[in-house]
Amino acid sequence: MSSSYEVPKGKNIRIYLNGNENGYNPFKENLKNSLNSLENLSINRYPNNDYEALKALYAEYVNLSAENVIVGNGSDEMLNLVISNYINHGKVLVTLNPDFGMYDFYCSMNEGTIKKFNINLNEGPIDIWEFIEFSKEEKADLIIFSNPNNPTGMAFSRDEIIEILDNLKNTIILVDEAYYEFFGQSVVDLVESYDNLLVTRTLSKAWGMAALRVGFLIGGRKVIKELSKLKVPYNINSYSNMIATNNLKYKEIMIESADKIVKEREFLFKKLKEFNNEDIKFYKSNGNYIFGMGKGTHKLGKLLEEDGILIRDFNNNSIRITVGSREENIVLIKSIERIIKGRLLWEE
Ligand code: PMP
């Protein structure tokens, strides 16, 4: 590969490919506008608990009304709100294995039982009829999955989710669309037609505002009205509210950045899959990250860290690498190339 970028030596250079954030920081320039208006902020006052402008702008982005939306302190808070409403002792939450770890966390906090349907990436896509059957057998009270799935990058198509909704009409199904913008398919438009559908979204990923902690719960007006009663007051601080509200007006900035990441993902995947062997295999992804599995993954994570590159090691023979900028990806690829060609994964 022709590039002037060299593999960093030592721990001085840090490349963060572990948190699935948007490394381009697309609203960096825009932040100055928001900060200019900061002086009008009355920090002695509580925020207005309705977050009307923020809600209205996000509702416009998803083509729904503000009554379909609850604003959360990250989508994490909204996952907690939904799980604590539907899960308690004796109730069953069905999810996928692997999936986002916080589903487990909130389920056990509420003393619920979690049942996981295994994703077998090497056996091809999930058979949704088997997943529906599994959910029925386990008597799911609530089903949650991320789509695209974090960490594997696999995704159910919109039609498959409709099939799930139609066949589990009495079960609440929360589709966590944290990575929607890198995939392009959503079911958010169906919330008024399906009583059993809830969707979470976030500003932490494609929108590049992870530090602000802003996410959304979206559903039919009736259920959103009920669930709103469980939201804690003033959950978004006034700074986050102001900056997020300002940035949501510039959807095109986010779209340009997300498109760039999707192109980078395909570039990175093309290179990474050339390294596939019996000890490590990378999988095609619909998110802003690439999943790798095999017994060499843990060592790879450690060696990359020595090169100053942080990835996510799940310590179960699997890793997840967030798609970085072209420069970061090239450094990463060179580092992996050096590790694999030098047979360092096999050294004790
Ligand atoms: N869902 C999924 C699938 C995630 O990966 C994450 C963050 N890693 C979240 C939800 C939570 O995101 P946030 O609280 O930042 O909105």
Image (cartoon, helix red, strand yellow):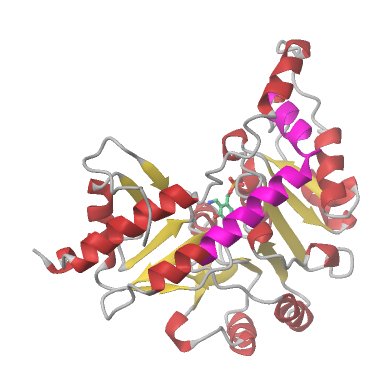
The percent position of residue 340, horizontal first and vertical second, equals 23, 67
Q: Residue furthest left?
A: 348
> Toward which corner of the image does residue 301 lie, by quadrant?
bottom left
Is residue 257 within the magenta segment? Answer: yes
Q: Is residue 284 visible?
A: yes
Question: What residue appears at the point 68 percent right and 33 percent down from the top-left corner?
Answer: 235
Q: Is residue 215 above or below residue 276?
A: above
* Above or below for 213 versus 118: above
Question: How many numbered badges does the structure rendering display?
Answer: 0
Q: Whole-percent x and y of residue 291?
A: 43, 66
Please tell me which residue is depicted at 41% across the width and 44% down the height of the picture: 16
Residue 193 shown in magenta? no
On screen, 188 above or below 162? above
Q: Check the image and report above or below for 119 versus 203.
A: below
Residue 325 falls left or right of residue 160: left
| In-image side of 214 versus 45 (left or right) | left
Image point (75%, 61%), residue name: 198
Q: Please state, as top left, top right, bottom left or bottom right, where the C terminus lies in the image.
A: bottom left
Q: Residue at x 71, y 81 (%)?
A: 160
Q: Main secondary structure of the magenta part?
A: helix
Q: Quadrant of the N terminus?
A: bottom left
Q: Nearer the viewer, residue 221 or 216?
A: 216
Whole-percent x, y for residue 130 in the image: 59, 88
Write down the region rendered in magenta: 239-266
Residue 18 visible within the image: no
Rendering coords of residue 314 (x, y %):
35, 60
